[in-house]
Image: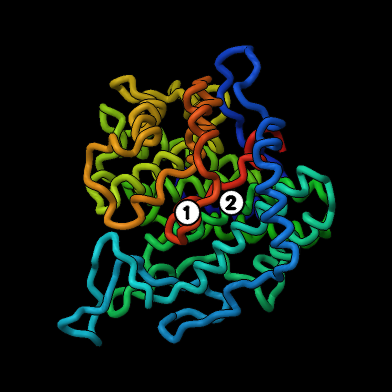
Amino acid sequence: MDRRAFCISAAAAVATRTHLLAAPPAQVSANAPLITLGDIEVIDHERILRAANEYLSQPPITITAYSSPRSKGGKHDYFSEGDYWWPDPKDPNGPYIRRDGYSDPKNFNDHREALIRLSLMVPALTAAWILLQQKRYAEHAALHLKAWFVDPATRMNPSLDYAQAIWGVSPGRGTGIIDTLHLVEVSRAARHLERADVMTAADFAAVRTWFTQYMLWMISSKNGQEEEAAKNNHGTCWAVQVAAFAAFTGDENAMSLCRGRFRDHLLPDQLAPDGSFPLELARTKPYSYSLFDLDMLAMVCLIASGSGTTPTGATNNLWEFALPNGNRYKKAVDFMFPFIQDKSKWPYKQDVEYFDDLPNRQPSLLFAGLAYREPRFIALWRTLPPDPKTAEIIRNFPIRQPVLWVGPI
């Protein structure tokens, strides 16, 4: 299917209510799983309820509450500024210049912070509903969904034309699409909330329509296509988002597109024979970016894996897809494992910022541990802190509630 046909098919699917369940991790034996949903509910019970009870008193706040005179968009258009771009000391009023790895605290960040706030609250509230089946948690999560994706006065437009703008250089770039990575777990929570019966059918259909429209924009727009083609973690994050939104909207064409990106581009372009990610190691935050890409590739495997093979014989189980040299995604987890277990063994340069704030409870360890039946992955996952405290680390840690991901919806 060519891109034009895909877009037509995606647009036609806006009104459908087909449910596409994300494939569970590959079952390589008939043995019981190394860790169950019940186990995770026990592990995370206190942290989930502590967060959810705090969030119950906090109202929805969307991007319409904040504005920047530097944005070329309107009230409902998401706007952010490039992370590593600063005023030029030689020309303070001229185009910004890049300082890789260093974020300018004066750049407009309010929309991004609002989006991260949404990504913290809705999944935690939904997880609390799963634990206790008390509707107050699901109802409050639904208020956030309606404010962001339904209410005409406060909803965000389903596009990202003005994300990660650079003063004097660009009003918005494809790289900005990584900002909506925080909608991945929100869309997963929304799938759970449909069972809670806390939104009208029309409102829930409107939420699904928003995600379908945004996914279509990601696939068909210039910015979206630029991000899709990125060879590093940005390309991975494009695929994670499209796969998650395809799972929510029931779009198998989009899901198939993500599987193809993983097999044909993400793994071949990024995974070195030793299991490292050279494009991330070349950055000023090699440890952080390697962990981040490891997590996001795991999410592509988790969400987009399916059964059977393609007409050419390629497996749809992305956990098991192998490059010509035999390497699977597992090679990357094996490579990073000793450096997650003991960061002092990291043989490369340290990150220029926040090196001491890592690692955290990387979701790649949990999901790869289940997929490959590796007890050491899950054992290490259990020992790591689940809730980073530094804003920059929180931003690069968008999968926080494993209760939403382990087991069926």
In the rendered structure, which disc, 1 or 2, sits on the residue that comes first in sequence?
A: 2
Q: Measured from the top left, where is residue 406 in percent x and y?
A: 64, 34
Question: Tag on residue 112?
Answer: none
Residue at the location (49% across, 46% down)?
A: 240
Using the image, determine if residue 124 lies above or below residue 365.
Answer: below
Residue at the location (63% across, 13% down)?
A: 31
The answer to whether residue 316 is visible is: no
- What amino acid is labelled 1 in the image? Ile
Q: Measured from the top left, where is residue 199 in percent x and y?
A: 81, 59
User: Which one is in front in this view, the residue at disc 1 or the one at disc 2?
Assistant: 1
* Picture quadrant where residue 336 is located: top left
Which residue lies under the disc numbered 1?
Answer: 219
Q: Measured from the top left, where is residue 243 in percent x and y?
A: 54, 44
Of the 4 image quadrants, the one containing the C terminus is top right
Badge 2 crowding class, 10 Å Cα cut-off, few under 14, some 14 to 19, many 20 or more, is many
Which residue lies under the disc numbered 2?
Answer: 10
